[in-house]
Image (cartoon, rainbow, N blue to C red):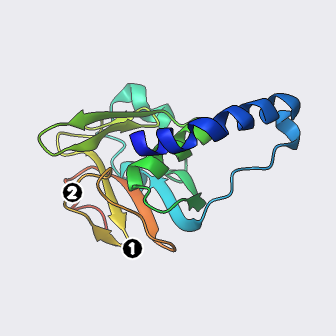
Amino acid sequence: STKVTAESSAPQASVATKAETTSAESAPPKKFDYTCLFEIECRTILSNMDKLSKDKKECVPDDGVLFSAETGFDKGESVYDILKRVCDENGIQLETSYSPAFATRYIEGIGNLYEFDCGTASGWMYTVNGEYMNYGCSLCTVSDGDKIAIRYTCNMGNDLDLQ
């Protein structure tokens, strides 16, 4: 990131000046190099509502889907980068922590649904093109056309089918 800052420090000044004279409404939306299908879902909770913490019931959408859409991203972005942007842009609560032992981000909660909210074996997992990855989401680089699913499990992933 130091390299990017050093290369972009001069242009940023001219961009900032230009941005001051351009209204936000007329600014074109950010264009991304690539797209992926991106979903955040907690469908397994729907059949495990009896295990769900009572104060969390209002956090579960009727269809179990918090977000599902084609999403743009740039080369080199990770699943975490896209997840963070999607949550920020759509007002979805996200809490993660950095795990130095694994040098990656750990998803603690999305949409106010946290690990252990629906039993001792519950929490968030993710797939890329239907495959569960065995490393953290901030280490997983996304490719054009990938299908990413961030999924809530109530039973260590045993209740999740490949979608």
Q: Cα distance, mark 1 to mark 2?
A: 15 Å
Instruction: Find the residue positioned furthest to the top.
Output: 55
Mark 2 Cα shell of 10 Å, populated few (<14), some (14-19), many (≥20): some
Percent x, y of residue 81:
44, 48
Residue 116 appears in the picture as rendered: no
Q: In the image, residue 93 lies at what x, y percent? A: 48, 33
Say if 12 sits above or below 44 in the image: above
Residue type, mark 1 in image: Asn
Amino acid type indicated by mark 2: Tyr
Find out whether the residues at labels 1 and 2 contact each other: C-beta distance under 8 Å.
no
Which residue corresponds to the image point at 52% horizontal and 44% vertical from the top-left?
7
On residue 135, the disc is 2
Q: Is residue 85 left or right of residue 160?
A: right
What residue does disc 1 label? 129
Residue found 82% across the figure and 43% down from its top: 27
Helix, strand or loop status at disc 1:
loop
Give left or right: position of 58 versus 45.
right
